[in-house]
Image (spheres, rainbow, N blue to C red):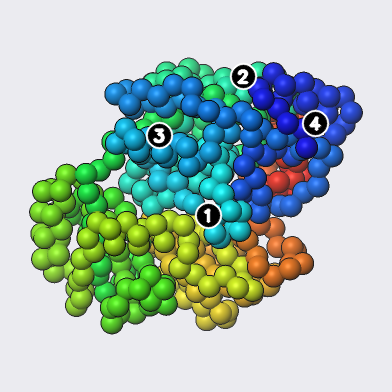
Amino acid sequence: MIRVTSLDEAAEVIAAAMADKKKLGVTAGNSKAALGRQSVYDDVIDASAMCGIIDYQPEELVLTLRAGTLMTEVEDVVASAGQMLPFEVPDLSALLGSGSTGTIGGVLSTNLSGSRRLTAGAARDYLLGFQAVSGRGEFFKSGGKVMKNVTGYDLSKLICGSYGTLAIVDNVTIKTLPRPETAISLLFGCNSMAAAVSLIASIFATAHEPNAAAILPAPAAHAATIEMDAAFVVVIRLEGIEVSVNDRAAHLAAVDLGSDEVHRLEAAASALLWQQIRDVTLLPTQERAIWRISVAPAQSPAILDQIGARFDIDYFADWAGGLVWLSASGDASFATALRDAIESYGGGYAQRIIDRRSGFDDVPPFHPLSPTHLALHQRVKAAFDPLAVLNYGRMHAGL
């Protein structure tokens, strides 16, 4: 473990690794070590000392901080100014068994985004700028402190979700947003997953401005202590100024959407439910694998029906049905069947997040790349890290 306090020091370590033909792991909070392939490295760069708030201008909705800053500190700072991170960062510490929410750098490197992703965008959409050192040991920067301060390539979109395989990042600038005055949820009962997806589409076609939508099958609803006599529960969140939220909720509840049962959750209960959805605490995990599936919402019912007919699964959906969190006991044959089903219904993405069974590592955690996408990944890796020094093999074998 090589502890660094700056990008200058990180560049020196990378240069030495290049000369010695070593592979380097990169970590800070180590809260997301379970995500991705478990590779073995010669040394590990510990960037946890690259932490702290550099500049925060609430009136400009701009926060600049070091990448190793803990998420607990980040959220406390923006909350004290009545603001929030727009992409609603999930806390996967319970799911991953990490005991920590991690750092802002870890969030950006994995592009983790919560339920507001449906209407507000992902983490990468709010990264205004950063400084970094590549796997070549070369310094570069992208963006600045305003949304339109981008010339050349928008590297923020490339770095977010790269799992530290391209560069070590620091001095990140993020756009913040005002925290809504209040938020409540409406619950609608449905008799099928397809009906739930259709109901959400109908709600988003109205003028009531929901900002998040989830679908809970009865087992997940019961885990959230929701007592409704329905096979599926659609959860719709409304947020904003209190008088507006109450007015929209009343009108939306009165619309005939084909649901026989409509309940309302007030602010505290609503916040707790969305925390459970965001942090993926509504699924059984003992001796099971947890999968994250991203598909077109209209296709998720058919995919789940096809997989559920062959395997024992539990699931719930966020992002109006486009993000499915799935718990399964199946082995490699399950992974193949799941990914084949996704491809047969128009394509998508299935990532194995964690597997509670010891010694079970024969399933690639990331969705296999097509030949075209593999070639693109190889060219990007070669441009930033030609000797594959940083986090080699973390996402895909050979990259």
Identify the mark nearer the N-term, 2 or 1: 1
Numbered tag placed on residue 77 in the rendering:
3
Identify the mark nearer the N-term, 3 or 4: 3
Numbered tag placed on residue 92 in the rendering:
1
Q: Tell which tag, 2 or 1, sits nearer the viewer.
A: 1
Question: Mark 3, residues whose alpha carbon is within 10 Å: few (<14), some, or many (≥20)?
Answer: some
Report which residue position mark 4 lands on: 387
Query: Residue 186: x percent and y percent?
Result: 23, 63
The answer to whether the residue labelled 4 contacts the one labelled 2, judged by CB atoms less than 8 Å apart, is no
Q: Which of the 4 image quadrants contains residue 184?
A: bottom left
CA separation in Å, label 2 and label 1: 31 Å
Q: Is residue 27 visible?
A: yes
Does residue 363 appear to the left or right of 76 in the view shown?
right
State the quadrant of the N terminus. top right
Q: Secondary structure at mark 2?
A: strand
User: In the image, what residue type sits under mark 4?
Assistant: Leu
Identify the mark nearer the N-term, 3 or 2: 3
Query: Residue 263: x percent and y percent?
Result: 21, 70
Q: Which of the 4 image quadrants contains residue 12?
A: top right
From the viewer's side, name the closer residue of 65 and 278.
65
Q: Tell which tag, 1 or 3, sits nearer the viewer.
A: 3
Q: Tell which tag, 3 or 4, sits nearer the viewer.
A: 3
**Vertical arrangement, residue 77 with respect to residue 332, above or below:** above
User: In the image, what residue type sits under mark 1?
Assistant: Leu
Q: Tell which tag, 1 or 4, sits nearer the viewer.
A: 1
Q: Tell which tag, 4 or 2, sits nearer the viewer.
A: 2
User: In the image, what residue type sits under mark 2?
Assistant: Phe
- How many marks overall? 4
Q: Secondary structure at mark 1?
A: loop
Does residue 399 appear to the left or right of 271 in the view shown?
right
Does residue 199 appear to the left or right of 292 in the view shown?
left
Q: Residue at x 10, y 54 (%)?
A: 247
